[in-house]
Amino acid sequence: MRPMFRAQPAVLLAGLVLAGAGVLAQPNHVDIIAPTAPELAAYGPHAVGVRTLAATDPSRPDILNTKEGAPTARYDRTLTLEVWYPAVLGTGQSPGGEYRVITRDPSITASLHGQAVRDAQPRAAGAPFPLVIISHGYPGNRYLLSHLGENLASKGYVVVSIDHKDSTYDDQKAFASTLYNRPFDQLFVLNEMARLGRAGSGSFLAGLVDDNRTGIVGYSMGGYGVVNVIGGGFSAASVDFSSAPPNRLLAERSAGNPGYRNSIDPRIKSAIAIGPWGMQNGFWDAEGLNGIRTPVLFVAGSVDDVSGYERGTRALFEGAGNADRYLLTFVNANHNAAAPYPAPVELLGTNGEPPAPYAHYADPVWDTVRMNNILQHFATAWFDRHLKADVARQAYFELVPQGKDAVWAVDREGRTLPEHTYWKGFKRGTAVGLMLEHRAPQD
């Protein structure tokens, strides 16, 4: 039985959380499941293993060392990856482990705690498992959505989260590199995980990964990459954006490039884009968005002042007319809606000074644990539906659009009454502040 945690600041600051069989005096848990969490947020039946890998893409265009009008420089681009997977724990092993992570203030390192066991034995039963790729924001790192990585692995997924070079807290470089490299990084990691997952690869992932059932999650600039990877070709105007890479290199992945259409990878069966950046800056137009045909769940805060809401994520949702898509909105949340893990206690007292490290993780209105649990719930339903063909999960999306309008009607024996329209899997009162909207493909 997995423990439940109360998402109360006093509890988090005291570090009194349940883990495994006892009480550990540890703050910064990424595995908190609050009593108010929707039902699919709970960890699944599998133990979780975690390993760190490095992968190198040879001869990638070197954006930072290419001059306008000069030949494109090239380099070997190495990415650090965190991989969570279903595991079998050995004698004496119990769930739980620590991540030492660089924070938004690179001079401060935090200790995160979760369920994953470092280098645990992969679980052969049930393999191969669907693959989920996670891509962080600018800046960020591979641990930013570790709460989701662990959670999905416990439910029978192999999850890989990317440290995007030139875009991490301690390696933040000019924006042009991120603009160019995000979609290429995501596609390279898919190919690398497919290679390592093949029988005889010599990797612990051999036989563990089904890359033909791949999902992808991107937050902020990660979401920007996701939109492009699943068919949202960049606009002609984006190629000349003020921070764009030299030599019009973004045109490689523009809607006007015939070769771009051939790059859409059919192995990617579904996507989640959280606060995706770019729409409000003109990176997509109607032509580009019409290229999206992959089912996509957009997630946003309604007052997102980084990626925008009405002209940002909502405009993407409305514009992707050929895709089956949903929009989950956290009303009055800002750019940090759902994605980042709770702000580490090591950053207490740092807020208010640029770049405001504590505020980088926290939302002024919403509790982060609650948002994480809601994302875990919907991500589970989404990927189970699209990567595991579990049609019963569709019921978790057939909801009254406004959570505040849903009606709770249950008798004393717990049986729902005819007038009951409350969000499936949500406890009474906990859908308030949420919206879930659907648009069917137009063709």
Image: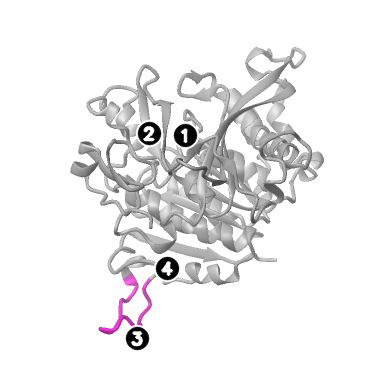
Q: Are marks 3 and 1 in contact (CB under 8 Å)?
A: no
Quarter occupied by residue 322: bottom right
The answer to which of marks 4 and 2 sits earlier in the sequence is 2
Residue that label 2 marks: 112
Q: CA distance from mark 4 to mark 3?
A: 20 Å
Q: Is residue 173 visible?
A: yes
Question: Is residue 241 depicted above or below 329 in this figure?
Answer: above
Was residue 407 drawn as part of the magenta stretch in this picture? Answer: yes
Q: Are marks 1 and 2 in contact (CB under 8 Å)?
A: yes
The answer to which of marks 4 and 3 sits earlier in the sequence is 4
Could you say whether the residue bearing mark 4 is in a helix, strand or loop?
A: loop
Q: CA distance from mark 4 to mark 2?
A: 35 Å
For image coordinates 48% across by 45% down, the residue present is 150
Q: CA distance from mark 3 to mark 1?
A: 43 Å
Query: Magenta segment range?
Result: 405-422
Could you say whether the residue bearing mark 1 is in a helix, strand or loop?
A: loop
Q: CA distance from mark 3 to mark 2?
A: 43 Å
Q: Nearer the viewer, residue 281 or 145?
A: 145
Residue that label 3 marks: 417
The answer to which of marks 1 and 2 sits earlier in the sequence is 2
Q: CA distance from mark 1 to mark 2?
A: 9 Å
- Residue 223: image location, x then y, percent: 55, 42
Residue that label 1 marks: 143
Question: Is residue 163 depicted above or below 5 in this figure?
Answer: above
| Outermost residue, bottom side | 418
Give the residue type at disc 4: Pro
